[in-house]
Image (tube, grey):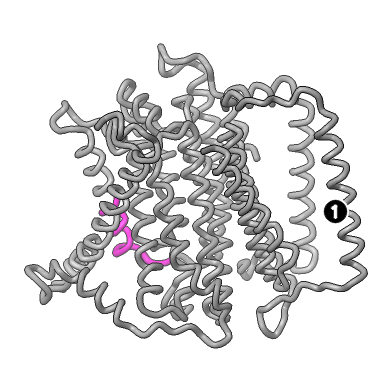
Amino acid sequence: MDAWLSNPFVHGLVYGVVVVTALMTVTAWSIWFERKFAGRMQSRTGPTLVGPYGLLQPLADALKLLQKEDIVPKDADRVLFNVAPPLTVLFALGAAAVVPWGPEQIAADLDVGVLFILAMGGMVVFPVWIAGWASNNKYALLGGMRSVAQGISYEIPLVMAALVPVVLCGSMSVSDIVRFQLEHGWLIYSAPVVGFLAFLLFFLASLAEANRIPFDIPEAESELVAGVTTEYTGMKFGLFYLAEYLHTLVISAVASALFLGGWGGIGGLAPGLHWMVLKTLLLFGAIFWIRWTLLRFRADQLMTLCWKYLVPGGLALVMAAAAWVHWGAFAGTTATPAPAPAEQGAR
Amino acid sequence: MEQIGFGIISACLLGAALGVVTGKNLVHSVLWLAVTLVTTAALYVFLNATFLAGIQVILYTGGVITLMLFGVMLTRRDERVMVENEQNGRRLWIAALAALGLFALLAAATFKTPGLPRTQAEPTTTDAIGRAFLTEHLLAFEVLSLLLLAAMVGAIVLARRHDAGADARGGL
């Protein structure tokens, strides 16, 4: 059994199916959770009719979406219009491949895991742009353009924030970074200030990349109708919706692994997997909390925040992390200050 | 197994590259180029250069292609958003000649290079790449950063000259 599982193809397939199924299930019910949560915040009750406490609402939503008529606008670019929705889900899920859920539970333990996550994050803007362009609709196109502008801008602070754990731990493998944290303490506190600020920066930039409020101007239903999703109906619209939540969930998992010690728990109370899931869900919940608390930024405020504050801040953080490693903060670790990753920040 | 994988990826690469040059629609060409660059990254993975593959995807697909899409959208203000790719007979011949010449040059160079490794290379570590940049290739690295800085300043100057009030109104 073990020999059979260690075949890379079988391993990838099994973990792929398990991880994707788990993420999809959590995502479906997170929509129920969000509606309940938002309802309580606004003194409403949220869904109550379908099943106990409205628990079957996600199933009802999915069934409803599947029954809708599938409309492709006459002047749309047919192929690209149909390709965009599945691509969004693909790229949103992609990064989950290298997230370690426990010491052994990882689909693909790449040496360059962090790079892979960033590459997937960078690709997310593509399908959104394609959708906007292929719809041949003014609002959709505007939404697409905004998404590209936002995506390439926030990619930079995101890369810098992700470089901080890479520099501190001297490795690009996500599981190595978690192991380092098990030994030296979670980065969010073991590298005072630097770790915490890098975590905040990563979280903010990821929210922007996932188009979540307060950074959801590509969608901005109140000014752009529904942005790129304007012309989409039924399950194609559903896929965009799904991809947004999936991306947010995967980001929460990545942030937990990079900054919050991954599968490391307090006092060995439960197996690693539980801690990782708990941390991921807490972060995921925090994102909903932010969504229902804050308003949307204006497009120019968004760019100002990114280029005037986050990018210089990110550069300073990478330098601070390099200095931290150079003057031997984590005593007893490898002496190599990992020069290569620091280069990338300069590009 | 590796042969099959290499064959599939190469076929995808060539198909995508054909899509770039034969596409009538400029946006389709750019998107095919994105596919080409991603499949090139897959080839790098086969060569055990995973770091290079990651950088290829981030810089070229995530950065350059996105900017190209932006460029296509901002420079042409057509009634409909469809942008046509121009094609005519004489240019086709010139392009074919240039491509053949380049192919001959590259093929000659490949066949003349002695002792190409026949086995898979050792995986290059990020550490080694960084060291090489800051020691052996320091000059090239610094010159490159200067070039990028110049490009950035140039872009800002060009953007500011036409529209000085853009900042006050807020970009997009």
The amino acid sitting under disc 1 is Ala
Which quadrant would residue A50 be assigned to in this image? bottom left
In the picture provided, is A222 more to the left or to the right than B138?
A: left
Residue at image coords 59%, 40%: B53
Does the rendering let one see residue A286?
no
Q: Is residue A98 shown above or below A62?
A: above
Q: Please say whether residue A289 is one of the residues in the magenta stretch.
A: yes
Q: Chain of mark 1?
A: B
Label 1, residues with CA under 10 Å away: few <14, some 14-19, many ≥20: few
Give the overall secondary structure of the magenta segment: helix
- Relative image position of residue A263 (x, y in whole percent): 27, 34
| Quadrant of image for the N terminus of chain A | top left
- Relative image position of residue A217 (x, y in whole percent): 47, 68
In the picture provided, is B17 more to the left or to the right than B42?
A: right
Q: Which residues are magenta?
A: A283-296
- Relative image position of residue A271 (x, y in whole percent): 18, 32
- Relative image position of residue B3 (x, y in whole percent): 58, 39
Residue at image coords 48%, 23%: A324
Q: Is residue A282 shown above or below B171?
A: above
Total marks shown come to: 1
In the picture provided, is A170 more to the left or to the right than A238?
A: right
Between residue A63 and residue A334, name the one nearer to us: A63
Residue at image coords 58%, 68%: A145
Between residue A200 and residue A81, name the one nearer to us: A81
